[in-house]
Amino acid sequence: MTEKTIRIGTRDSELALWQAYTVQKKLNDLGYKTEIVAVKSQGDILLDKPLYELGITGIFTKTLDIAMINGQVDIAVHSMKDVPTALPIGIVQAAVLERANVLDILVHKGNLDFLNETGTIATGSLRRQAQWLNKYPNHTVVDLRGNVNTRMQKLQDNDWSGAVFAAAGLERINLKPETFIDLDWMIPAPAQGAMVVVAMGNDNFTMDAVSQLNDIETEICTYIERQFLRTLEGGCTAPIGALAKYNEQEDVIVFKGTLLSLDGKQKLEVDKVVPIKEWKKLGFHAAQEILENGGNQIMIELRKQLKPNTN
């Protein structure tokens, strides 16, 4: 095997590094030489503004995209839900790893009485905010930014009732506390729980290496979810949820998607069960159904509300 070392680009948070080391081990087990190259992204540095105000859907991926295009790294490892549906020219999806836990969870402080009363919930995700307010309209939602370690600390330091996290992120770095509940009613972000590896499309050596890590079931399900997101024209920050699952016994894809207004008062959902052979257009057709049933108007309002402030 050639001696080329595959340089793995990653953000420098604990979770991002865990993801990069996971990919590194898998490549090393296949006989490839690797090294980790950690960089800081704007998304980690600019913690004083909500993500949507920065006007960049790919804020967590932009720095690594530039490093890859400039030849400083060969691949980048991301939480797939953070990756824009349109990749920069020259960069391609090389592998999607087998999916972990897809659920959102509520981390609380040992007392759940607030679920039947008033409470304050922290989340930086407009999708989680909208779904929470839809179910608990008398609650207050506050913004919560930073990596998972920072957000867990902020929860402890404030008098909030709880905060919403992706289960997979906390499980990967052993931060999941005993005081949590699964939010199985909340539709996750498209591709939540999945890790994606991107590479330069013209780098045949690296593409061949990384393609061996691909999990086809996860690739198909995340493709459907991201197609749903892309068809709605929602960036990573819009209140859009999607989850596709493969039912092996019946050889079908089970899909659920949702679009909400920011305040959670408007909510559109779509449920589909289709034969596996029809997966390629499932996300598109589900999104069209949402748009035709009032989703167009919700998206128009969302674009007005989420327009970046240029002052």
Image (tube, grey):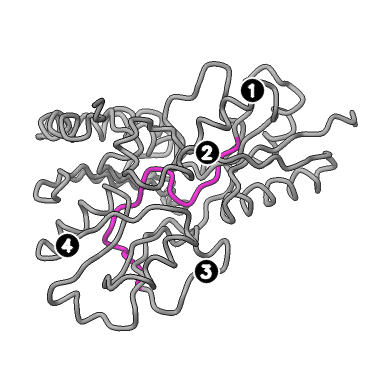
Residue that badge 4 annotates: 140
- The Cα–Cα distance between marks 2 and 4, rounded to whole angstroms, is 30 Å
Which numbered mark, 2 or 3, is in the foreground of this view? 2
Under mark 2, the amino acid is Ser
Residue 2 is marked as none
Q: Amino acid at mark 3?
A: Leu
Q: Amino acid at mark 4?
A: Thr
Q: Earlier in the sequence, mark 2 or mark 4?
A: 2
Q: Which structural element holds mark 2? A: loop
Image coordinates for residue 261, horizontal then vertical, percent:
15, 43
- Residue extent of the magenta highlight: 181-197
Q: Quadrant of the N terminus?
A: top right
The mark closer to the camera, 1 or 3, is 3
Dot 4, crowdedness within 10 Å: few (<14), some or many (≥20)?
Answer: some
Comparing labels 4 and 1, the label whose residue is closer to the camera: 4
Instruction: State the image quarter where residue 32 is shown.
Output: top right
Q: Tell me if residue 184 is in the magenta stretch.
A: yes
Q: Which residue is mark 2?
A: 41
- Residue 262: quarter of image: top left
Query: Which residue in the structure is indicated by mark 1?
Result: 200
Q: Which numbered disc, 4 or 3, marks the residue that appears first in the sequence? A: 4
Assess disc 1: are there few (<14), some (14-19) or many (≥20) residues with their C-alpha within 10 Å of its C-alpha: many
Answer with mark 1 or mark 3, whichever residue precedes in sequence. 3
* Mark 2 and mark 1: Cα distance apart in space: 19 Å
Which percent across, then down, holds residue 147? Answer: 48, 54
**Who's the residue at 69% across and 30% down the image?**
73
Q: Determine the residue positioned at 51% across, 47% down.
A: 194
Which element is circle 3 on?
loop
Q: Residue 99: say if magenta.
A: no
Q: What residue does disc 3 label?
A: 175
